[in-house]
Image (cartoon, helix red, strand yellow):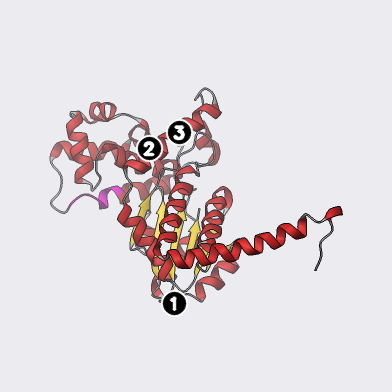
Amino acid sequence: MLVTVGYGARVADRRNLDGFEEWLRARVPQRGLRPKSAAVVEVLVSRPREASFGSTADLARLAGVNVATVTRTAQALGFAGWPALQQELRARYLSSLSAPEVAEEHHGVGSPASAALRRDLDGLALLNRRFDEAEIREVAEAIAGARRTVVIADGSYAAVGIAFAHNARLAGYDVHAIMAGDAELANATAKLTAEDAFVAISFWRLYESTVLAANEAHDRGARVFAITDAASPALAEAAERVLIVPAEGVTFFPSLTGGMALAQAIVAQLAAVDPARTGRSIEAAEAMWSRFDLLHRRPGGKSVP
């Protein structure tokens, strides 16, 4: 099983915003939308920053409709309501910006430390409201049934992948983090079979190597899942399930709190799949930890063979 982890103002990348419009229009139902809902979509496409940061009242005013129409439009596009749609809109908008532009979007938040804590608390509350136990169980059971799990993590979000791999391995499953770059990723992907699974975790900006590996894993018959803050079509096409988590920070780097919480939830569920297996694994690890402690605590700091 392969787990990949990655995080993607005033001026936005035109190519990414074009992709934003394509994604949004693809969600319009085949029967079309009522005129007022169509007006809401046009505001989302033409004014992505206001849509990303404004309230339902702000968006309703821009579109010339009432607040209820904004909510109904979000639901027509396949979301539970405006908050769920706005989370993905904002994640996609921020991914079109450079790191300095992302920082500028959050300029003037007051105390950065306090703002970061509040943002993480809000993100966890949103994640909890959108929690779907069936999705968590599906990913955990895929890992438990996989022959092997490989975790790919890069950049500031590497911590999520490292923690995921470490704890899943402690739970008794063959999980490894790849930290040596694309060459090792290519080698690991080339060995995937229908007995394996692939989980791509990507926040802010999506690495091309992640997309290529996810599609290759799918083509090789592996089960593919994605954990991300915005369901990129390039990644979602290869995944049988996409789990959305909030990842917006208050400066130039993403928040890892939501991603880490979801990764820990998956591992907690994984440990419950086969408690006896996890128990044996923990006992073996504790025995080894005891031996290592004895080595490191010898008088004088010397170890013994």
Q: Considering the numbered disc 1 on the image, is that residue within a helix, a strand or a loop?
A: loop
Residue 157: in sight, yes or no? yes
Q: Name the residue under label 1.
A: 193
Of pointers 2 and 1, the one earlier in the residue sequence:
2
Q: In this view, does 116 lie above or below 281?
A: above
* Residue 247: image location, x then y, percent: 45, 43
Crowding at dot 1, Cα within 10 Å, few <14 / some 14-19 / many 20+, comes out as some
**Mark 2 and mark 1: Cα distance apart in space:** 37 Å
Residue plotted at (23% across, 48% down): 78
Q: Mark 2 points at which residue?
A: 125
Q: Mark 3 points at which residue?
A: 119
In the rendered structure, the answer to whether residue 148 lies left or right of residue 88 reads right
**Mark 3 and mark 1: Cα distance apart in space:** 40 Å
Residue plotted at (58% across, 51% down): 155
Hey, which quadrant is residue 75 in on the image? Answer: top left
Identified by mark 1, the residue type is: Thr
Residue plotted at (77% across, 56% down): 296
* Residue 206: image location, x then y, percent: 47, 54
Crowding at dot 2, Cα within 10 Å, few <14 / some 14-19 / many 20+, comes out as some
Identified by mark 3, the residue type is: Arg
* Residue 96 belongs to magenta span: no
Label 2 close to label 3 by CB (< 8 Å): no
* Residue 25 belongs to magenta span: yes
Hey, which quadrant is residue 269 in on the image? Answer: bottom left
Give the foreground label among 2 and 1.
2
Which residues make up the magenta segment?
24-29
Label 2 close to label 1 by CB (< 8 Å): no
Observer-nearest residue: 107 or 150? 150
